[in-house]
Image (cartoon, helix red, strand yellow):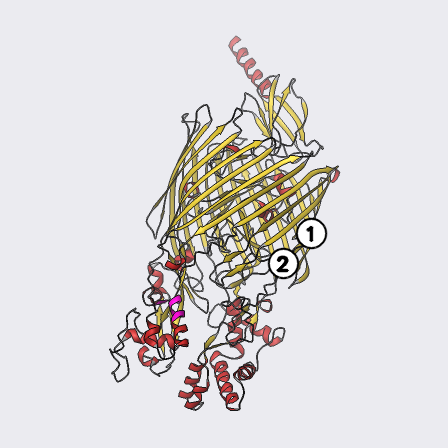
Amino acid sequence: MRSYLLILSLFFCGISFAQNTITGTVTETNNQPIPGVNIKVVGDKAGTVTDAEGKFTLTTALNPPFTIEVTSVGHQTKKVSVTSSNQNIAIKLVDSETTLDEVVVSASRAPERVMESPVTIERMGLKDIRKAAAPSYYDGLENLKEVQMNTSSLTFKSINTRGFATVANTRFMQLVDGMDNSSPLLNFVLGNLIGVSEIDIQNVELLPGASSALYGANAFNGIMFMNSKSPFTYQGISTYLKYGATSQEAAGTNSFYDFGIRMAHTFNKYFAAKANFTYMQGTDWFAVNYDDKTRQGEGITRSDVNYDGINVYGDEASTNIKAVGQALAERGLIPAAAVNLLPNYNVSRTGYNEVDLTDNKAGNTKMDFSFHLRPLGDERLEVIWQSKFGFGNAVYQGANRYYLNNFYMSQHKIEVKGKNFFVRGYTTTEDGGKSYDMQFTGLNVNNKWKDNTTWFGQYAGTFVQATLAGQTPENAHILSRQVADTGRFLPGTPAFQNAFNQVIADPDVLTGSKLVDNSRIYHADANYNFKDIIKYGEIQVGGSYRQYQLNSYGRIYTDDNGPINYDEYGVYAQFQNKYLEDRLKFTGSVRYDKSQNFDGSFSPRVSLVYAGGAQKQHNFRASYQTGFRNPSTQDQYIGFNVGSAVLIGSAPDNLLRYTETRPVANGSPAVGQIYAGGSSVTITGENAYLNSYTRASVNQFAAFIAANPGNTPGAAALLRVTNVSNVKPEEVQAFELGYRSQYEGVNIDLNGYYNIYNNFIGNTVSVAPLYGTVSETFNFAQGAADPIPYASNPAVQTLHALGNGNIRAFQLYTNTDLKIQSLGFGIGLSKRMFGYYDFGINYNYAQFDFDQAKDPGFEAGFNTPKHKIRASIGNEKLFKNFGFNASVRWNTEYLWESTMVDGMIESATVLDAQINYGLPKLKSVVKLGATNLGGKDYIQVLGAGAVGQQYYISWTINP
C-alpha cells in the first residue's frame, strides 16, 4: 500500500511539473505583435513560437524561477526571468542593428548564423519583404547583392547570379519548400508562376555561385530557396488587395490588380492546415523593337527588301529572288532572258508586329493547400502533404518569342521531416494550354492568305515588268511588294482574326503554331544529420533521384512515337566541425551524380571560416568547390523547327529521330535536283553534326562571292566544316574569398570569386547543304568534264547548294574546347543611424574571358553588366505607424547574346520607392509605391518589351 501511494505521489507530482504554463505576448517597441518568435527555456528542451498575434503558451516541467530566451530574426535576443507558475509576460523586442546574426539553413543544410556561413549568402526575411520598395517581394529580389533580373514579361522574370544570364536560365535553381520550381519541358524556372504568395512567404535565401556539392547538377551559377509559413506558427486569415497602373511609352497607361488570401488553422498540437489563393491581371510590356535582327543600329527599316525585324514575325520567310525567277523561267512563266533583270539577293515577306499577334495580357493565378501532421505533438516529427497549382499568361523568349497563354503547372509533395532528417517526394506536371510560337503564327497567317511560292512568284514577275517599264530598282521593289501583298489580312479585320485563331490552335508547324506539352518530373530526395549520434563534428548524408518524362507529341521534342524518359541520381556526404576554441570552422563535402546519358561526376567542396577579434566579430572565409551541369532536356532531345533554323539536341538517338523533307531548287546551273536525286530531299539531325559548314564560314563564302562574282575557288577556301561533338556535362572550378564584420555599427560583407569553366555548353549554328559532301579542300578539275558537271564531285556540289539556297540551318547544342573564365567581386555596406534610418549600398563587378577568335561560331552569352551599384534608405518608424523605403540601382551597358538576337543593352538607372502606414486596430498596413520613378523605359532582355513604370497602392490585413 505504501508503494502504491508513493507511485501515485510521483505520478501527480509529474503532472504538476507538466502543468507549469507560461503565457505571454511579444511585440515591437511600437506595440505591433511579432509572429514566429522562438521562445525557449534555458537549460531545458521546452520551447514554442508566437502565433500571428504575437501570443505564446509555453509548458515546462521546470519549477520557477527559470529563464526563457526570446529570439526573432531582425531583433536583439532577450532573456526574461520567470518567477512564478502560470505567469503572463509582456515582452518587447528591440530591432537588431545587424543582419549578420540572422540564421540561415541553405549554405550548409544546417542552421547557422549568416556571419558563420562558409559561402556568400543573401537573405530576405519577413521585415525585408514588408518594407521592400517593389510591387512584390519577388520583384524586390533585384535589390539583393549579386542578383541580376531578366524581364521577359510583366509576369515572367528570370533571376541569375555571376554571369551567363538568359531568360531560359538552366544554370540557376529555385526551390520552393524544397521542390525544384523548374518547368519539366523547359528545364528552367518560370519566375514566380508557381512560387509562394505575398502573404505566405516566410523568407528567401540565395546562394550565388556553384552549389552542386550539396544540391546537385543544376545548382551551377546559384540557387534560391523560397520558404513558406507554417500553419502551426502563422494562423488565421490574411489577405491583401493591390491596385495600380503600368506606364510604358509603347503601351500607354494600363491598370493592373492583384489579390491574395491565406487561411491557416491549427486544430490542435497534432494537426494544422493552410490554403492560399492569389490572382493578378494586367497588361504586358509591349515589345516594339523594330530594328533588323542582324543589322541593329544601321538604320535598317521596313523599306529594306530583306528586312527581318526583331519584334516582327512572318518576315523570316526569305528567299533569293533571282532563284525564284529561274524557277519561273523553267515553268515558262517569264522569258529566260528576264532572269538577268532580277537582283541576286534575298527578299523577305511582309511580317506582322508582335503587338498584333498577342492580346498583350499578363496574369498569374496561384493556388495551394497543405496538411501538416505532427504525430508526437511537436517539431520532432512532421508529415506534410502539399499541392500547388499555377496558371499564367506571359511571354517567354528563347529562339523565338512564345506567348504562354493559360500555361499550367502543378506540384504535389509528401514529406516526412524531423529534427535531423527529411525524406520527400514530389511530382511536377505541366500543360501548355493555349500557348503558341509568335514567329510561326506570323509565318502561317501569311500562308493563309497567300503561300510563299505564289507571293515570291508575284514579287519576281512584277519586278521584271517594272524594270522593263523603266522603273528604278528602288521603285520596282516598292511596286513588287505592293502587288505581292494584295489580299494581305490586316490586323483587326475578321479575316485576320479568323486566320489567327486557326493558326494558334494548330500544332502542325507547317500550318500552325500551337505549343503542345504534357511533360512531367518525378523527384525524391533525403537527408540525415548524425549530430546527435556522432559527437565529433557534424556529419550529413543524403541523396536524390529524378525521372524526366518529356511529352510534346513531337511538337518540340522528337517524341512523335511517345514520351521520352530518362533519369538521374546523386548521393552526397558532408563533414563540419569547429576548432581553435570554435574560431575555425571546417566544412568538407562531396557529391556523386549520374545521369542516364552521361558518365558520373564528383563535386567536392572545401571551406574554412575563421572568426577573429576579441568578440569573434571578424569572419574570414575561403572556399573551393567544383560544380557541373548536365545538359538540359533541350540540349539532348529538342527537335524544334523555328523557321530560320532547326534546334537540334545532340543525344545520339535524337539525331536520327528528327527528319525533315526539304524542297530542292534547280538553281543556276539548273542541276540542283539532279545532284539531290529529286525535287526534294529528306534530311535528319545527323546532317547538322556530320555534313555541314559553320555559319560564320558560309557568311564569309557568300560575302566573297558577292564581291568577286565567278571566283568560286576563292570563296570555297573560306569554308570550314562543322566539327562539334555531342554535348556533354559542363564543369566549373569555383574559388571564393570573403569577409564579414560589423565595425562601429556598419555591417560589412566583402566577397570575390574566380571561376574556370570547362566544356561550357553553348550554341553554334551550322549550315547543311541538301546535297553533296562537305569538305575544306576542293578539286575543281575532278568532274568538270562530266556530262552533268561535277556529278562525280560531291564536295563541289555543296558549293552549288550554298550558292542556290539549297541549305538547312541548324542550331546545335555543344561544348567549347576553350577555357572560359569569369571573375568578380562585391561589397555590401549597411548601417542603422539617426534613430531608425536604415542605409545600404552594394557594388558588384563581373567580367569574363573567352578567346572568341579561336571559336568564332560559339556564343558564350555572358549577358552581364561589368558594373552594378544599388543603394537604399528606409525608416520603418519615421513617425507613429508611418514608414518608407527607397532604392536605386544602376548598371553599365553590356552585350546580350541569345539564340534569337544579339546586341547591346544600354545602361540604366532605376529608382523605386514606397511609403506605408500601419493601422494597428485593423491589423492592417497600407502601402503606396512606384517603380522606375522619373526614369525612361529600359531593356533587360533584347527582344522583350521595355520595362516602364508601375504605380500601386495595397492594403494588407493581418500581414
Does 225 sit above or below residue 716? above
> What is the CA distance from the residue labelled 1 to the residue labelled 2?
18 Å
Left/right placement of residue 876 relative to residue 629 reads right
Q: Position of residue 428 (x, y in %)?
A: 48, 51
Does 53 sit above or below residue 451? above
Q: Position of residue 634 (x, y in %)?
A: 42, 58
Left/right placement of residue 367 relative to residue 400 reads right
Point out which mark residue 937 bears: 2
Q: Is residue 625 visible in this depiction of the protein?
A: yes
Tags 1 and 2 in contact by the CB under 8 Å rule? no
- Callout 2 amino acid: Asp
Which residue bears the numbered disc 1? 952
Q: Residues within 10 Å of mark 1 (few under 14, many from 20)?
A: many
Quarter occupied by residue 24? top right
Q: Going from the N terminus, do you reach mark 1 or mark 2 first?
A: 2
Q: Position of residue 309 (x, y in %)?
A: 54, 69
Does 259 sit above or below residue 54? below
Tell me the quadrant of the picture where the C terminus can be found: top right
Q: Position of residue 430 (x, y in %)?
A: 50, 55
- Callout 1 amino acid: Tyr
The residue positioned 36% from the left and 80% from the top of the image is 710
Q: Is residue 549 magenta?
A: no
Quarter occupied by residue 48? top right
Q: Secondary structure at mark 1?
A: strand
Q: Secondary structure at mark 2?
A: loop
Point out which mark residue 692 bears: none
Foreground residue among 580 and 244: 580
Question: Is label 1 or label 2 in front?
Answer: 2
Q: Is residue 695 magenta?
A: yes
The residue positioned 40% from the left and 68% from the top of the image is 809
**Region in magenta:** 691-700
Q: Residues within 10 Å of mark 2 (few under 14, many from 20)?
A: some
